[in-house]
Every structure is written in C-alpha cells, then in structure tokens.
Amino acid sequence: MFILKPDYPHLALLSGLLGAATALLALPGVAAPERAAAWWRRFPRSVWPGRVLAVVSLAWAALWAPFVMLEFFQGAAARMFPWVQVAFLALAAGVVLAMPDLLSCRAAGMLFVLVPTPLLSAARWHPSPARLLVVLAAYAMAVAGMFWIAKPWILRDWILAANATPRRARAVSAAFLALGLALLLCAILAFPLAPDARPLS
C-alpha cells in the first residue's frame, strides 16, 4: 500500500530515490559524454530495455488497478481482482511480443505515467514549500509519459537531438544531474519532519 498511496512522511524517501535515480542516469553523460550519447542513441531501438521496463510498468499497474477499482466500485470489484491481474499479464505479454518497434520509448512512457502517483500522494500535505519541486517534476513526468506512450517517436527524437554532439550531451546531462542533486538535497534538508510537524490542510 505504501507504493500506491504513501503519506506525507514518506516524501523524503521518495524524493531521495527519484533524485538518486536521476543523478545516476545523468552522471555518465557528464563524465563520458561520447560513450553515454552512443548508448542513448541506441536506446529507442533496444529491445531488452523496453521489455524490462514494460514488464515492470505493467506489473506495477496490475498491482495498482485493483485498489482503484475497490475505491470506486466496491463489492463487485473485489471479485474482479484476479481477472484484472490476468488481463494485465496478458497485456504485458502482448506489448512485449507484438510491439518491439520503439518499445523502450513506450515502456519509458508507461513508467513516467506511474511514478508521479506516489510522489503526488506524498507531496500533497507535506508542510515544506520545497514540495513544489517534486510536484512540478511529477506533473512533467506524467505529461511527457502520456505523449511517449501515444507517440514514442517523440522521445526518440528528443534523445537523438539531446545526444547529437558530445558537448550537447554533456550539457543536457549536467542539467539532469543538477535536478537530481536538488531532489536529493530536498530529501535530506527540507523533507524530513520533526516529531511535532503537522501536515497542510
């Protein structure tokens, strides 16, 4: 349940995880932009990263969907839980096997749509004004993810443009590294709560 609807005390952990992931993905582009750019240019057509991301995303969605159904369709929805999970497993197999073209971009979009849910849940009532950084990042991820699912070539074009030259790759990676470090600093300095802290209302 923590993964699905974490409360405001968990914002420090979630911000730290997102910041660390962002910084780790960006660091190779700062340290070795030529090698990192070559890898990123291969990513949209790479099958195995797409398969892994698709399975993770659809498994997460299969875990999350029954709780949404229980909240809005109580009673009969409980009996549908197993069928919903079977449907998601079938969907995962279909996506992996039948949509190999730009699968990595579509799967990245799926993940970007799912990740904001716990972030926004935790940031909603947190008393720190710095929570707005997480909110902005979450909404940016959600909007980008929806476009990437429907039009995966958008992410492909962005990746190719961002990694067209080593200098540009390093600049883009440095910007994402700065974002990751900012989220980490918020997780360490702004989001931990004192025992008597009260949520926003």
Image: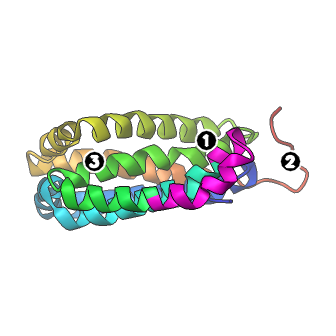
Q: Which residue is mark 2?
A: 197
Q: Where on the picture, by quarter, is residue 54? A: bottom left
Please identify, in this view, whether the residue under mark 2 or under mark 1 is nearer the observer.
1
Q: Is residue 148 above or below residue 84?
A: above
Please identify, in this view, whether the residue under mark 3 or under mark 2 is nearer the observer.
3
Q: Which residue is mark 3?
A: 106
Q: Position of residue 135 (x, y in %)?
A: 56, 37
Q: Residue at x 86, y 47 (%)?
A: 197
Residue kind at label 3, given as amino acid type: Arg
Q: Which residue is mark 1?
A: 120
Q: Secondary structure at mark 1?
A: helix
In the rendered view, does 60 fall on the left or right side of 8? left
Q: Position of residue 173 (x, y in %)?
A: 28, 50
Q: Secondary structure at mark 3?
A: helix
Nearer the observer, 54 or 133: 54
User: Image quadrant for the C terminus?
Assistant: top right
Nearer the observer, 4 or 6: 4
The stretch in magenta equals: 68-86
Q: Position of residue 179 (x, y in %)?
A: 43, 46
